[in-house]
Amino acid sequence: MSVQSIFIVVISGFFLVAGSSFARTISPEGAQAYIISPINGEVATSPVIVKFGLKGMGVAPAGIDKSNTGHHHLLIDVANSPALDKPLPANANHKHLGGGQTEITVELSPGKHTLQLIMGDKNHVPHNPSVMSEITTIIVK
């Protein structure tokens, strides 16, 4: 097989995996993620410390396969829920807390912002059913 053929096979495999659905980890019954602070409607100054709460399951770093655990992802100003059968994106609007952190400090511009938590499994894929917080809306002055 030529180098060009190997390259095409590798690239084709990458696109196949990138577009694929992933198996979702089952979440414990009744598990809940929630934002402790800031509270909905709060007027805050940047940087904002966002503290997380979790009920009915534990926190484990990304890459750790331990039943009934996951790690937090903070969605900032995300209008539509992310795909639930793929790893959550990592960008300015999707903060990964893969180390098992339960709070994060974020710089936010003045104005209205929405915050929401979603738990991800060892591979950053949301659990089934999803463990998501309510949306918290804050105003940064």
Image (cartoon, helix red, strand yellow):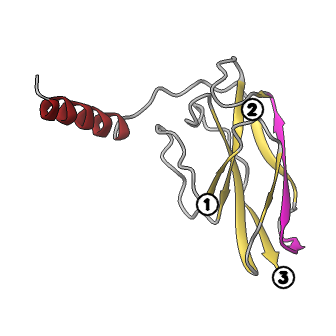
> To which residue does mark 1 refer?
93
> To which residue does mark 2 refer?
31
Residue at image position (21%, 34%) is 7
* Amino acid, disc 3: Lys
Query: Is 83 left or right of 63, judged from the image as shown?
Result: left
> To which residue does mark 3 refer?
141
* Amino acid, disc 2: Ala
Mark nearer the N terminus (1 vs 3) = 1
Give coordinates of residue 5: x percent, y percent. Answer: 13, 31
Numbered disc 3: secondary structure: loop
* Quadrant where the C terminus is found in the figure: bottom right
Give coordinates of residue 23: x percent, y percent. Answer: 47, 26
Q: Do the residues under discs 2 and 1 have CB atoms within 8 angstroms?
A: no
On residue 46, the disc is none
Between the residue at mark 3 and the residue at mark 2, the CA separation in whole angstroms equals: 34 Å
Numbered disc 1: secondary structure: loop
Residue at image position (69%, 38%) is 98
68 and 106: which one is in front?
106
Between the residue at mark 1 and the residue at mark 3, the CA separation in whole angstroms equals: 19 Å
Q: Is residue 46 magenta?
A: yes
Query: Is 48 left or right of 64, judged from the image as shown?
Result: right
Give coordinates of residue 124: x percent, y percent. Answer: 58, 36
* Residue span colored magenta: 41-56
Between the residue at mark 2 and the residue at mark 1, the CA separation in whole angstroms equals: 24 Å
Residue 22 falls in image quadrant: top left
Residue at image position (87%, 61%) is 38
Q: Is the magenta stretch mostly helix, strand or loop?
A: strand
Give coordinates of residue 49: x percent, y percent. Answer: 86, 59
